[in-house]
Image: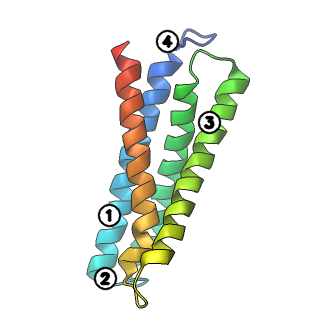
């Protein structure tokens, strides 16, 4: 299951570690965003946007690193394709969650309904990353 690149770096462990740290950061940042909204109200605090974009960057890095970690030991082209697939998977999870939320939310939803897709995507990324990290570092 190991994957050492041409320079001798264990890409399995390093990609898994980056993915895990980024996933934790995404969860933390988007949780902080929710806390800011809960305290200040939606759209009333400039930190809300900064936390969203930082969380988005962390989630994108995490999903790309997760894809690369899952393809460790394969060719560079395969790892790049897997990283792109990881980002696509994150987008699909967020989009499907938003579609389901739109079907089940009340007619006058609170701000929390609009945040569900972020929370689900971040937690799905964290779960998939934790499982991958555990499997990759055990072997």
Q: In the rendering, at what x and y percent does residue 124 appear? A: 42, 48
Mark nearer the N terminus (1 vs 3): 1
Quadrant where the C terminus is found in the figure: top left
> How dense is the environment of label 3, judged by Cα within 10 Å: few (below 14), some, or many (20 and up)?
many
Q: Secondary structure at mark 3?
A: helix
Residue at the disc numbered 4:
2
Residue found at x 38% / y 51%:
123
Residue found at x 46% / y 24%:
14
- Pointers 3 and 4 in contact (CB under 8 A)? no
Residue at the disc numbered 1:
32
Q: CA distance from mark 3 to mark 4?
A: 17 Å
Q: Secondary structure at mark 1?
A: helix
> How dense is the environment of label 2, judged by Cα within 10 Å: few (below 14), some, or many (20 and up)?
few
Q: CA distance from mark 1 to mark 3?
A: 27 Å
Mark nearer the N terminus (2 vs 3): 2
Mark nearer the N terminus (4 vs 2): 4
- Residue 46 visible here: no
Residue at the disc numbered 2:
40
**Residue sitting farthest toward the bottom:** 108
Say which of 34 and 106 sits in front.
106
Mark linked to residue 15: none
Q: Nearer the viewer, mark 4 or mark 2?
A: 4
Q: In the rendering, at what x and y percent does residue 35 appear? A: 29, 70
Q: Is residue 4 left or right of residue 134?
A: right
Q: Nearer the viewer, mark 2 or mark 3?
A: 3
Q: Nearer the viewer, mark 1 or mark 3?
A: 3
Q: CA distance from mark 2 to mark 3?
A: 36 Å
């Amino acid at each position: 299951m190991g994957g050492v690149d041409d320079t001798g770096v264990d890409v399995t462990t390093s990609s898994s570690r980056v993915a895990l740290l980024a996933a934790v950061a995404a969860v933390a940042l988007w949780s902080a965003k929710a806390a800011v909204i809960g305290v200040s109200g939606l759209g009333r605090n400039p930190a809300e946007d900064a936390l969203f974009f930082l969380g988005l960057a962390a989630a994108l890095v995490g999903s790309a690193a997760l894809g690369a970690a899952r393809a460790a030991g394969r060719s560079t082209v395969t790892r790049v394709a897997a990283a792109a697939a990881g980002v696509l998977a994150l987008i699909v999870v967020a989009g499907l969650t938003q579609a389901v939320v739109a079907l089940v939310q009340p007619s006058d939803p609170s701000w929390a309904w609009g945040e569900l897709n972020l929370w689900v995507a971040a937690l799905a990324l964290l779960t998939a990353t934790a499982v991958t990290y555990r499997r990759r570092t055990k072997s």
